[in-house]
């Protein structure tokens, strides 16, 4: 699953640490999400989407295999 987290974060001029604190995860989790090495839980995806004022579908791009 791809996502737009890094793009949205940079638009707001946020560090990975600032985003991590805002959505209550570690900076390492944000790094892993941005690099596509970790898929967010539905709960985390919702927190991230709400933080950016977007829908989950606007932040996360679901691809069928």
Image (cartoon, rainbow, N blue to C red):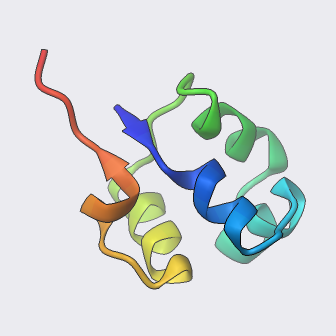
Q: Residue furthest front?
A: 11
Relative height, residue 39 to residue 24 (above, below) = above
Left-right relation of 13 to 59: right
The residue positioned 63% from the left and 28% from the top of the image is 35
* The quarter of the displayed image where residue 37 is located: top right
Quadrant where the image shows the C terminus: top left
Q: Nearer the viewer, residue 40 or 63?
A: 63
Quadrant where the image shows the N terminus: top left
Residue 25, percent from left and from top:
71, 58
Q: Nearer the viewer, residue 52 or 41?
A: 52
Q: Residue furthest top?
A: 65
Residue 61, percent from left and from top:
29, 43
Tell me if I can see residue 50 in this picture: yes
Q: Residue furthest left?
A: 64
Tell me if I can see residue 24 in this picture: no
Residue 63, percent from left and from top:
19, 29
* The quarter of the displayed image where residue 64 is located: top left
Left-right relation of 56 to 25: left
Q: Nearer the viewer, residue 63 or 45?
A: 63
Residue 47, percent from left and from top:
49, 73
* The quarter of the displayed image where residue 18 is located: bottom right
Q: How many marks?
A: 0
The residue positioned 45% from the left and 85% from the top of the image is 53
The residue positioned 82% from the left and 68% from the top of the image is 14
The residue positioned 76% from the left and 61% from the top of the image is 20
């Amino acid at each position: 699953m791809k996502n737009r987290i890094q793009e949205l974060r940079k638009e707001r001029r946020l560090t990975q640490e600032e985003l991590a604190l805002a959505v209550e995860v570690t900076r390492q989790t944000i790094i892993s999400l941005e690099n596509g090495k970790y898929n967010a839980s539905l709960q985390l995806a919702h927190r991230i989407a709400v933080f950016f004022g977007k829908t989950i579908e606007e932040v996360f791009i679901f691809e069928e295999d």
